Amino acid sequence: MQTFVTHLECSLTGERYPADRVHGLSASGKPLLVRYDLDAMAEVLEREEVSRREGGFWRYREFLPVRFDANVVALGEVTTPLIRLPSFEENDELWVKDEGRLPTGSFKARGLALAVAMARELGLKHLAMPTNGNAGAALAAYAAKAGLRATVLCPADTPEINIRETSELGARVFRVNGLINDCGRIVGERAQDQGWFDLSTLKEPYRIEGKKTMGLELAQQFDWQLPDAIFYPTGGGTGLIGMWKAFAELEALGWIDSRRPKMFAVQAEGCAPIVRAFAAGKEFAEPWQDAQTMAAGIRVPAAVGDFLILRAVRESGGAALAVSDEDIIAARSQVASVEGTLLCPEGAATFVAWRQAKAAGLLDEGSRSLLFNCATGLKYPLTDHSTMLD
Ligand SMILES: *Cc1c(COP(=O)(O)O)cnc(C)c1O
């Protein structure tokens, strides 16, 4: 299979790095981005051809860095459905992209499928990372299939189902008395003597390439007309940055025009470093102290790609919004009981943010908005609405 990778590039300085080598962060400690020969790709690939292909994100093979098909690790990836929520619409459109249908029940499958395939291609043997739950499970699954070892460190209060799932899938799991950045620090410190490769999000260059496929896929699903607004539950921000990269690549290919959705980074009130930096007009975000929220996937006090999230949000004319756990829980029940779609807490957070944005006049009349339900709602503790009948 042909790949169009030319090199990697520091996301802050633009400094170039060769492809086909093992890389972590750039010399300035920032994420590396994969670059492609998009002119060459435009000559041989048409969007209609990609649309005709079967299956999930591997259909965007040319947009991805894996050189040899034998390194692709597949677990039955599907194109995740778009579900419309008409009950909540006024003179606008509201859609959910339901990522809970992917292997291991979350969109982390996209990133880890790519990271594991590239690890295999580059000859790595033992992968390790910090996780709030879903990334660990996805790593465990793809590593198991690829025959690689996986070690995962998670906060001790990570949802129990994620911890059990991850160890059932063959990874070694450590519960850490701390938050995800504490887990990340331990992975970084111990990587060398343990023989681990650090797969922390954005600290290696390929998870973002997998997450990028969300942007490619939704462009295709909306017939190459991007929605007017995207609400993204933002932890490390990999998906938001990845989609922003995908849109630039699609435009360079001439597959979409220069219009972009307003990108909304959604965080929890108890952990909102990006929202605080956005409001203060800062380029980088200060780490959040005492992070707390039931939406585990977005309990990320510090993100190495903070400036990339903030840049995309600002360039798009979007905003960073914080929502309360109370509103998340209420929204989850409301959407589930009215529309039959059980969102995960992070997905419900995007619904709350959409309402906030509308109330604050941040969306144009008639806007088509897209929410991300990033994981299956079944992975989280649910409210008991039942009545005991003796
Ligand atoms: C990882 C995760 C997020 C955050 O995704 P990023 O791209 O890292 O910001 C949100 N929700 C859930 C359920 C997650 O697992």
Image (spheres, rainbow, N blue to C red):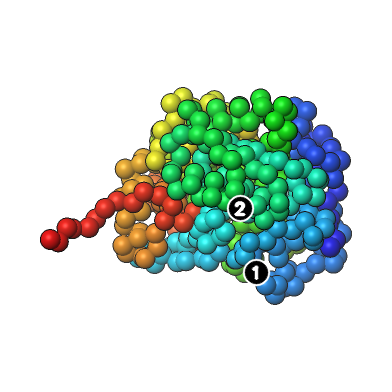
Q: Secondary structure at mark 2?
A: helix
The x and y percentages for residue 225 are 61, 64
Q: Say whether residue 363 is left or right of residue 201.
A: left
* Name of the residue lying farthest toward the bottom: 52
Within the image, what quadrant is residue 321 found in?
top left
Q: Is residue 225 above or below residue 363?
A: below
User: Can residue 235 be spotted in the picture?
Assistant: yes
Q: In terms of sequence position, does the residue under pointer 2 or pointer 1 come before the other?
A: 1
- Give the distance between the C-alpha atoms of the residues marked 2 and 1, in whole angstroms: 19 Å
The x and y percentages for residue 301 are 51, 31
User: Can residue 236 be spotted in the picture?
Assistant: no
Quarter occupied by the N terminus? bottom right
Q: Is residue 92 above or below residue 20?
A: below
Alpha-carbon neighbours of circle 1 within 10 Å: few (<14), some, or many (≥20)?
A: some
Q: Are marks 2 and 1 in contact (CB under 8 Å)?
A: no
Identify the residue at image location x=46%, y=24%.
289
Query: Can you tell me whether the CB of the residue at mark 2 lies under 8 Å from the nearest atom of ligand 1?
Result: no
Q: Is residue 5 above or below residue 60?
A: above
Looking at the image, which is closer to me, 185 or 266? 185
* Name of the residue lying farthest toward the left: 390
Q: Which residue is mark 1?
A: 55
Residue 9, numbered label: none
Q: Secondary structure at mark 1?
A: loop
Identify the residue at image location x=33%, y=48%.
329
What amino acid is labelled 1 in the image? Answer: Gly
Identify the residue at image location x=57%, y=51%.
169
Residue 141, numbered label: 2
